[in-house]
Structures are given as C-alpha cells and as structure tokens.
Image (spheres, coloured by chain):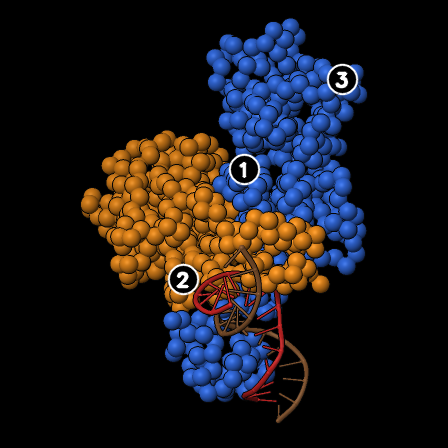
Chain colours: A blue, B orange, C red, D brown
Amino acid sequence: MKPTLQAVADAVGVSRSTVSNAYSRPDQLSAALRERILGAARQLGYPGPNPTARSLRRGFVGSIGVLFTSQLSYAFTDPFAVRFLAGVGEAAERHGTSMLLVPLSRAEPDARRAVENAAVDGFCVYCVADEEWALEVIRARGLPYVSTAARDDAGLDERFVGIDERAAARSVATHVAGLGHRRVALLADSVLPDAPAGPLALSGVDQVPHPTTHGRLAGFADAFADVGVGWAELTLVNAPDNSRQAAAAAVAGLFDRPTPPTAVLAGSDVLALGVLDVLAERPAGNRPPVSVTGFDDVPEAASAGLTTVRQPAEEKGRIAAELLLDPPADAAAGHVLLPTALVVRTSTGPVPRS
Amino acid sequence: MKPTLQAVADAVGVSRSTVSNAYSRPDQLSAALRERILGAARQLGYPGPNPTARSLRRGFVGSIGVLFTSQLSYAFTDPFAVRFLAGVGEAAERHGTSMLLVPLSRAEPDARRAVENAAVDGFCVYCVADEEWALEVIRARGLPYVSTAARDDAGLDERFVGIDERAAARSVATHVAGLGHRRVALLADSVLPDAPAGPLALSGVDQVPHPTTHGRLAGFADAFADVGVGWAELTLVNAPDNSRQAAAAAVAGLFDRPTPPTAVLAGSDVLALGVLDVLAERPAGNRPPVSVTGFDDVPEAASAGLTTVRQPAEEKGRIAAELLLDPPADAAAGHVLLPTALVVRTSTGPVPRS
DNA sequence: TTGAAAGCGGTACCAA
DNA sequence: TTGGTACCGCTTTCAA
C-alpha cells in the first residue's frame, strides 16, 4: 500500500489539511511543523500529493495537449511537425507545463475517446482536417484551444495562429508562372479523404475539404488564373499522406505522359522532395527538366535546393502554446497571422524550349 | 456550469451508476436505456466522464511519460531523440495511450515537481544522466519505468532497453586505430556537469558520471589501450551540450595546436557534425585531413558521409514503451540489449603522412 | 496556526 | 438490469 497524505498526517499527529498545506501553501504553517511533516513523509516514502487527486480537486491539470490528425509517429517524421512541436515545447517549458501528445489516427470512436480522456487544460490543434468532431469534443469539455488551420466557420473569438495559406501559395505559383510554365501539376496531401494516389479530377478547388490544402491549392490556382490557365488545365495529383514515398508514388507515371507537366507545385516540402526523388531516380538522359516547388521550408529543403515558401514553424508552435497558456485579454490579439516568404532556390527554372 | 454525470442521471431519471455504466460498461444495461442516456447527454452537452475523476477512481491514467534530461525543445532538435520519440509514439499509439513529455531542464525543485505531478502510469526515462533523484521520485510514486541508460546500480528487475555502449564505442575506435591514428581527441557531451567547453584533463574515464558518456569514452579508450595509447595520451574534449554549435565551439582551437589530433571520436553524430562544420569552415588550403566519427547514425550522418555506429533508434523507443505498457512476465526479458553496427563512410581515412 | 467537514466527478461492489 | 453506498486522495473554506 502506497502511503497517502492521510498516513503522513497520522504519523505526525496533525490533520490532512495541515499536511496538504505543508506541500501547497508553506506560508500557512510554521516552518518547524512543516519540516516535521516533510521529514515524516520522506521517512514513510510518501511521494507528495497524488497528481490526479490534486487535479480533480483543483480543477486543472498542468499540462496541455497537442492534437495530431495523423499518427503519432508521423508527428516525429514530418520535419515541419517536429519544428512546430519544438516551439510548443519551448513555451510549455517556460510555463512549467508538460505536453501531452494525443494521436487521432485510429478509427473515430477510439480517437474520440482519446480526446475525451486526455487529462489536459487545453489543446493546441495541429492541422486538424475535417475533424470538426474533435473541436466539438474540446468545446463540450469546456477546454480552451488554439487552432493552426483556419476554418471558414471559426468564431471570431477562436484563438488561432497560422499563415495566409492562399496568399503564400499564390506567391510561389506566381513565381513559377512567371518562369513561363503553363503545363503544371499541383500535388497535395489528402485532397479528398481516401482518394487514391495519383491524378484526380475535381471540378473545382472548393471541393477540397481540408482547409490548409484548400487554401494552398486555391492560391496556386489564383496565380495561374492570372496568366490565363484555368483550373481545368491544371493537373491535380493526390498523395494519400504527407510523405516522400506517397509523393513519389503519386507522381510516378506523370512524366511519361504525352504532355508531361513542366512544373510541379507541391503542398509541402516533404511532397516536393518526393517528386525530386522520382526525378533523381530516372537515368540522367531521360530526366525531364521539371521545376518543383515545396511549402514550409523545412531544413532539408535548403540542401535540396528547393524553391519553397518559408513559414516560421517553431514560432507557430510557440505562439500556439503561448496563446493557450497566457491568453491575451484582447480577443483580436488571439488571432495571429504569421509572415511567410518566397524562397527561390535551384529547383525552379524557366520552361525548357521543346 | 458544465454538466456532470449526475446531471445526466437526473435528466434521465436513473442513478449515477447507470449513467457511468452507459459509458464504461455498455453490457451492464439495456441498449435502449443506454441510448436514452447517451441521447440526454448529447442534449445536455455532457462530454463524457471527466478524465481526471475517472483516473482517480480507476487508479490509472492512460498515458505514459517520457522524461528528458534536457530542454523539451532539445528533444525535438536532436535527431536521435526525435527518432526515439517516434518509436515510443508508435507503441503508445498501438496501445491507445497518449504520451506526456516531461521536461527536466529547470532547477531541481521545479523539475522534481514536474515528475511528481505528471499524470502518467509510468515513465520512459530517456537519457537521464545523474538525475538519480528523478528515478527516486518515480519509485516513490510506485510507478513502473524503463530506462535507456544503463546504470551500475540498476537492479536486475529494472526494465531497460539499450545497447552495449562500451563495446559499440570500441568498435568504431578500433576502426580508427586500425587506420593508424594515434593522436586522437575524444569529444563528448557533459563529460562533467558544468565543465567548460574545450579540452578537459581527467585522470581517468571513471570520473565521468553520465553512464552513457562514460560507456562510450571507456570503449574509445579500450580500443586505443589495445594499440598502446593510454588514457593520458588521448585528448578529452568537453561539449557543454549535445549540439553542433557546442561541438564546434569545443574543438575550435584544437586543430591549431602544435600537434593537432589526426582523428576526433565524437560521442554522438550531432557532435561529429559540429566538428565537420568547423573543418569545412576553414579555407581549403588550411584544412587538416582529420578523421571524424560519430555515434547513433542519424539521418544526417549518411549525407555527411560520417563514419559512425548505428543503433536502432525507433526500435529503442518502441521497445521502451512496449516494456512499459506490456511488461514481460519473465524479468530477464525486461532487459533488452539492442544490436549496433559500425558504419564506415568517408569521414575516416588513413593517417596522412606528415 | 491548525482542524473539521464538505466536496471535486466518478467507479465498483453488492444488494435488490 | 438497476440503484445504493462507499470511497479514490486531495484541497479548501471556515471556524476554532
């Protein structure tokens, strides 16, 4: 039997309240008594107040949750996610708070339970796609949260940190359009839930449910509409998940078509790197000079020479946690839009003459 | 006021037990009643049983903690740590468990509290150096744990997953010795707590408290003792933390000495990459042909051509979590030694003739 | 400065 | 199948 606070109280001959005070409110009792209590506790092997019981009584836990749409292991595989987590961790640490990583990968009933059962004081919602249900659970629990993917129906009071996805995407697409590219493929992760890898016909970008993906694709389309290339003329390619492998599989046959794209705009650096992998695998003689762009500017992008859009990843995580742990009095200050920048490297170039 | 289980019970006109059963033991009541209860709950906006209260009563939480010696943000900066976490995450996910990241970076009283207050069912202890106190807290709490750094005083019943640090280190050092190197520097992180960056005189390897660092340095020393190079002839260099920057700073002056080392054996890939950074910064004409080795075989090591020791990082995390969540009946099976492999790349070569 | 009593929100046993 | 009743372990008024 593990010793409880009661046991310590009995040993010293004081009440539970006093023992509790010895731990939580040292100013409420004499230093001498406190020492006596702490000494007895040590002797009994009492490890201090049970955190669960304490949380129940106090009404808060002392940790924040980070919600991941995808597998927990993915969170550590995706370099952008890792940097985001680093930012959250930094802020959490500064507040003396732990962070609970909650995976949402499993079937809904299980995933739902994970959100319902998470012992946290609030959530940073990383990249929740159409998992509106998760937000509903959080709201029903009465917990605060900060989201990082803008949703149309987000209340004005909803805390948010993110970027203008559409404008950022447009900037890189404008760059590519400016280089003369007109036969272009757009590669994105989970364009539609459960869609297969590869080209996908969609009547319009508004069919894409995931807000981030939607924003980026819309931005790409904007830029090409500007130069007279309509949505129907763009090749939309779906990658089932955000990984190099998925991207490689998705674009596999693309460059062997009669009229292959001269540029691929990817919705993330990871996807773009997958495209570069595919191109690099082809024998040098049969390697079409395709321009490729990414999104995020993860560390690997620099060494790969990838043209991309930079967004401040750690900052995003840091601010998300900060917004959660230290909410601004002013509601408007709870909505943070981070800057982005077009980073032109060597993976894009003018259209080759054919 | 958030609705409680009691409110739902009142609304439906049943007892709390029955509502509780509706959530936790569906087989204990008729489907019809259950539906009625769940319906009422939905209507009232009851988010399901409060996780903290449930944990208190049930006696377990449903999440495991991962203890980090260093900053939480470091956990996401170090590629080896990230891969370890990915492994833990994978196993946790499979068990329907969340993972709580607990930082130990702050001053001891605060850090101690973090361990005392973590709402978890057990801990994976990642790389706890001399933080014996953390293990004491865990034991006092009566929680199970799995450690990844072997300690001399570890009980036989203590669950552990790791590698034979000393033998692994010896293998790479033997490789370097075999190439003819005799003037060698050993670079390690936190050789002594609070030691400054740079060369450090130590009478023997046994002065190094951190078990992992000790093991690796001892292995290095073993290999050179075999070829007649004693501890006193080796240059020990301390890096204050495990980062490229720290490594770079630590070895900064090393190559401008009258008799610079011809090889640097680093205690981690990250440190080794820092050494390579320093060398790469020097003008080509003034770049000594130093052999450099790492440890871990993180992804970056391959592209840097780093000779290193590979250890299965994800596997380590996965097994650590598995050992925690699904303890083997046989105590001996709770002690897992993972294989390592020497990976020879281009960063090592024969001693240049001078 | 210390203690008594009332919960915090549930779960589990056992009886009906 | 359902309900009554302890009780999980602690914190917090409030009174002594």
Q: Using a 10 Å C-alpha cutoff, classify the residue at mark 1 as few (fewer than 14 neighbours), some (14 to 19) or many (20 or more).
A: some
- Which amino acid, mark 3? Gly
The Cα–Cα distance between marks 1 and 2, rounded to whole angstroms, is 32 Å
B40 relative to B299 in the view: left or right: right
User: Above or below — where is C16 with respect to B265?
Assistant: below
Split into 4 quadrants, where in the image is the C terminus of chain B?
Answer: top left
Q: Select label 3 or label 2 by which is in front.
A: 2
Residue located beneath label 1 in the image: A78
Of residues B26 and A41, the one nearer the viewer is B26
Q: Position of residue A251 (x, y in %)?
A: 56, 19
B312 relative to A352 in the view: left or right: left
The subunit letter for the residue under badge 2 reads: B
User: Above or below — where is B157 with respect to A258?
Assistant: below
Residue located beneath label 2 in the image: B143
The subunit letter for the residue under badge 3 reads: A
Q: Is residue B216 visible?
A: no
The subunit letter for the residue under badge 1 reads: A
Residue located beneath label 3 in the image: A230
Sequence-wise, the earlier of marks 3 and 1 is 1
- Marker disc for residue A14: none
- Which amino acid, mark 2? Leu
Q: Using a 10 Å C-alpha cutoff, classify the residue at mark 3 as few (fewer than 14 neighbours), some (14 to 19) or many (20 or more).
A: some
Q: Residue at x 40, y 68 (%)?
A: B140
